[in-house]
Image (spheres, rainbow, N blue to C red):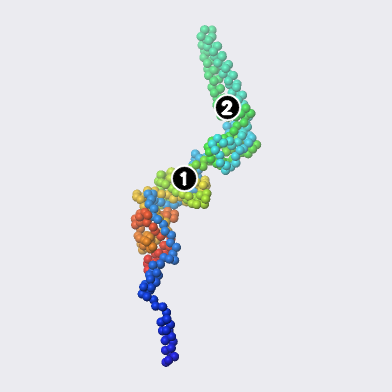
Amino acid sequence: MALRILPTLALVAVLAALPACSDTQVAETAQGEVADPLAGLDIKDATAKEISEVPIGSVPGVVTLPPEARVAVTAPFPGAAVRVYVIEGQAVRRGQALALVRSAEPVQIRGDLARAQAEVGLAEARAKRLVQLADEGVIAQARADEARAALAQARASLAEQRRLTSLAGAGPDGTMTLSAPISGRVAHVGVETGGPVDGMSAPFVIEATGAYQIELQLPERLAKSVRPGMSVQVMVTGDDGTPVEVGGQVLTVAPSIDPATRSVLARASIGAAPGIVAGRNVSVTISGNAGGSGVAIPASAITRIGDADHVFVKKGKSYEARKVTVVSRAGDNAVIGEGLKAGETVAASSVAELKAMSAE
């Protein structure tokens, strides 16, 4: 019996030697455990921002050039390229020389111009003499009228030769300089030094880089909601690697649905930016007026609790679940119509953990 009592007495002695904990210390320990339930969560906050246009949806698109942004440069007369000054992809300004072309026709036109000037001089002198003779009654009036008609014809031929000469813009040796009609980028070079230049084909094509368009494929569910004038946004990567938002607006929406793709073709304008290049595939967010204002938050902040959407609104150091009405979702963003005010802060991450904690 004594052997069993000794361990118990030893345990009591050890407990008695420990420092006593007051009620206040116990309460503080308990309070510390309860007040720090979010310590292990990496919660990122987001501020609700008021918006007047609601994102309707995101659709795929292809960047294109508007019809007026592409200009062909042609030679007025066929010839041979003496020099080519530009290469494909090069940026050019309006009036910049593209190539030097030599043609035999401008030389011939200059000769025709000189002959036309001489014919006009002869026709004027003949008409003056015959009119005078007709007035004196020496010859019939019909001959004077014929001289006047011949003079008019000679003057018309002279005017045509002058027009052709100015059109050619060639020097005495028949050389012509082809220049860029607009500022932009050389999209096509179809001639090389020493090669032939056809007067019916375009040796150069210049593309303007100030504005672009986007061809959109609208799914059937969005076709009735998208109208010309609605704004569009495209996220691209800037020169420094940061995302840049480029805005534009819807220009046209096709009246019918493509039976093969079940989509509607639309076209939107878009501003120039480093990441906007013709032929590039992009994701386009379309926004429109939903009949009232709302607030925008990250879509990751929304969770489903029961049969309603909720967000976790920050209150001091904690978060409380609040029921909200989601108007639309587009990409990584969502628009809240009711339940949240602009300026309030919501949890944009660790929402599943907050939801599990609120259910306990």
Q: Residue at x 42, y 89 (%)?
A: 5
Q: Residue at x 39, y 55 (%)?
A: 48
Q: Position of residue 271 (x, y in %)?
A: 47, 44
Find out whether the residues at labels 1 and 2 contact each other: C-beta distance under 8 Å: no
Q: Secondary structure at mark 2?
A: helix
Please give the label number shown on residue 165. Answer: 2
Q: Looking at the image, is mark 1 or mark 2 earlier in the sequence? A: 2
**Is the residue 360 above or below the residue 112 in the image?**
below
**Is the residue 273 above or below the residue 317 in the image?**
above
The tally of labels here is 2
Q: Residue at x 64, y 35 (%)?
A: 82
Q: Secondary structure at mark 1?
A: strand
Please give the label number shown on residue 270. Answer: 1
Judge left or right: residue 244 versus residue 324.
right
- How many angstroms separate mark 1 from mark 2 (CA)? 42 Å
The answer to whether residue 282 is visible is no
Residue type pointed to by label 1: Ile
Q: Position of residue 49 (x, y in %)?
A: 39, 53
